[in-house]
Image (cartoon, grey):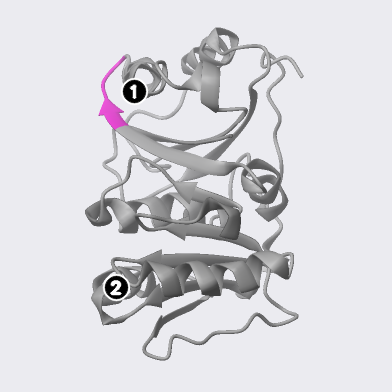
Amino acid sequence: MNNAEILTRFTDSKFTASFRVIGIGESTKDVIEAVKSFGYDLSATILTEPFDCAPTDEDKMAIIVAKDNEDSANRIAKQFHDAGILTIGLLDNADVDCYDSVATQAEYSEYPGILKAILQPMYTQGVIACDFNDLRATLADSKHFYVKSATRCGKERLKSAICDINSALTSSMPKTYQKILLSLYFNKVGRQPMEMQEMTALTEFAKSLPDNVEIIWSVYPDESIKADEIKITILGAGK
């Protein structure tokens, strides 16, 4: 598929109650507490020894978080992955065969932001929205994913944000990433509303990608950013 064709979707929230974020050990408490603070309708739990957790028929996605106890994290992840559940890993020393996709180039301190980037589109009513099916299509058996966000204000805010993200991805994308989810956030009560001419920066970004890269983009209101800001988050995935 040529990247110049940008796909759009509308939100389907029927899956969101079937998402699980599982912290392996008490060392993940700060990340799990951060997930709970998002206020989303999901299960966010900490496992303690003997680190046992089995998938259920209702589960659609499991995100495994570990700071240590990697062997236990990999074992639990394999159970979910073998059950056909979208299984995502946030940990060092992951056995990628136990997961659909594992965060790369990510520090432990970045895990709450990565989790917010994955989950926020699933729980936000978008002007143009992606849904869980898009997330699954992007991450399923991709083995590796990368999240990058940029927030900018001013006349060239969208172009500047895309430039910042593009420079961070350019070196690895031609060889690594086949699919990208791009989420654009704006404050709908802002003094500088989104204008159509700003959106040309997205088209230019899509055209700059290799032809084999598929991009799905979405637009959401977000009152957590300042009135004149926009935020772009890119999730790139691929083997």
Give the left or right position of residue 46, taking residue 52 as reference.
left
Q: Which residue is drawn at 53% across and 72% down?
A: 75
* Residue 16 appears in the figure: no
Q: In which quarter of the image is the C terminus?
A: top right
- Image x and y of residue 70, in percent: 38, 67
The image shows a total of numbered marks equal to 2
Is 190 or 72 nearer to us in this picture?
Answer: 72
- Asked where in the image residue 86 lies, by quadrant, the reply is bottom right
Task: Write down the region rendered in magenta.
Answer: 151-155
| Three-letter code for the amino acid on which mark 2 is drawn | Thr
| The magenta stretch spans residue 153 | yes
- Badge 2 is on which residue? 28
What separation in Å lies between label 1 and label 2 (alpha carbons)?
A: 28 Å
- Image x and y of residue 67, in percent: 29, 66
Q: Is residue 24 above or below residue 15?
A: below
- Image x and y of residue 169, in percent: 40, 23
- Asked where in the image residue 165 lies, by quadrant, the reply is top left
Q: Is residue 87 above or below residue 170?
A: below
Of callouts 1 and 2, the N-terminal one: 2
Q: How crowded is mark 2: few (under 14 residues within 10 Å), some or many (20 or more)?
A: some
Is 188 or 151 nearer to us in this picture?
Answer: 151
- Image x and y of residue 137, in percent: 71, 44
* Residue 228 appears in the figure: yes
Q: Are the residues flagged by discs 1 and 2 in contact, CB closer than 8 Å?
A: no
Q: Is residue 79 above or below residue 94?
A: below
User: What kind of secondary structure does the magenta stretch mostly adopt?
Assistant: strand
Q: Residue at x 47, y 58 (%)?
A: 89
- Badge 1 is on which residue? 168
Find numbered disc 1 in the image and state the secondary structure of the residue it sits on: helix
Is 5 or 83 nearer to us in this picture?
Answer: 83
Is 82 or 58 nearer to us in this picture?
Answer: 82
